[in-house]
């Protein structure tokens, strides 16, 4: 039985909120210098986010009528996707740097803060977008 797009969106937002608190916990572990636990949490969160995009976000966006999206909401969707894409590029890059497979060209702390900030903005924009299209 297939769910309607609103149900997919609601399930996604609930899971995204749980994921967001997991990421906050991961950040707290980084601040306590428990880097191994931090890295594991962020890696699992990144992978979980990938599955969430495929399983929940894509069906909702496919079902959304493009003509019903006004220009301001369209800008928000583009920003949401841009911040999300930045996270999806930064997390593996940071993983490769920390594993010694790549050399850092920018300060790691700055990159980690940019990833956390981007993930947070993408989450908040996603909440706003969901509240408008549902």
Image (spheres, rainbow, N blue to C red):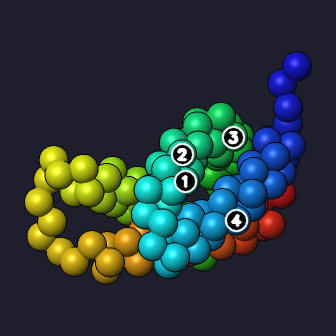
Label placed on residue 44: 2
Q: Where is residue 11 in the image (x, y as percent from the top left)?
A: 81, 46
Residue highlighted by disc 3 = 56
| Residue 81 pos. (x, y %) | 49, 60
Mark 4, other Cα within 10 Å: few <14 / some 14–19 / many ≥20 = few
Q: Is 94 on the left-hand or right-hand side of 59?
A: left
Q: Mark 1 points at which residue?
A: 41
Q: Which of marks 1 and 3 is nearer the N terminus?
A: 1
Of the image marks 4 and 3, the number of the one nearer the N terminus? 4
Tell me how far mark 2 sits from mark 4, CA to CA: 13 Å
Q: How far apart are marks 1 and 4 (CA)?
A: 11 Å
Residue placed under numbered mark 4 in the picture: 21
Label 4 vs label 3, nearer the camera: 4
Q: Nearer the viewer, mark 2 or mark 3?
A: 2
Q: Identify the mark nearer the N-term, 1 or 4.
A: 4
Q: Disc 4 versus disc 3: distance between alpha carbons?
A: 19 Å
Residue 118 can be seen in this image:
no
Where is residue 68? Give x, y as percent: 71, 58
| Image quarter hosting the N terminus | top right
Identify the element where label 4 is drawn: helix
């Amino acid at each position: 039985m297939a769910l309607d797009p609103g149900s997919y969106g609601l399930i996604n937002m609930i899971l995204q909120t749980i994921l967001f608190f997991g990421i906050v916990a991961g950040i707290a572990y980084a601040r306590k210098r428990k880097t191994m636990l931090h890295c594991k949490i962020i890696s699992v969160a990144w992978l979980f986010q990938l599955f969430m995009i495929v399983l929940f976000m894509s069906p909702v966006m496919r079902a959304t009528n493009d003509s019903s999206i006004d220009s301001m909401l369209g800008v928000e969707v583009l920003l949401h996707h841009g911040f999300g894409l930045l996270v999806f590029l930064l997390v593996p890059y940071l993983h490769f740097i920390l594993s010694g497979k790549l050399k850092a060209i920018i300060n790691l702390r700055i990159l980690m803060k940019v990833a956390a900030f981007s993930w947070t903005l993408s989450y908040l924009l996603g909440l706003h977008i969901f509240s408008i299209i549902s």
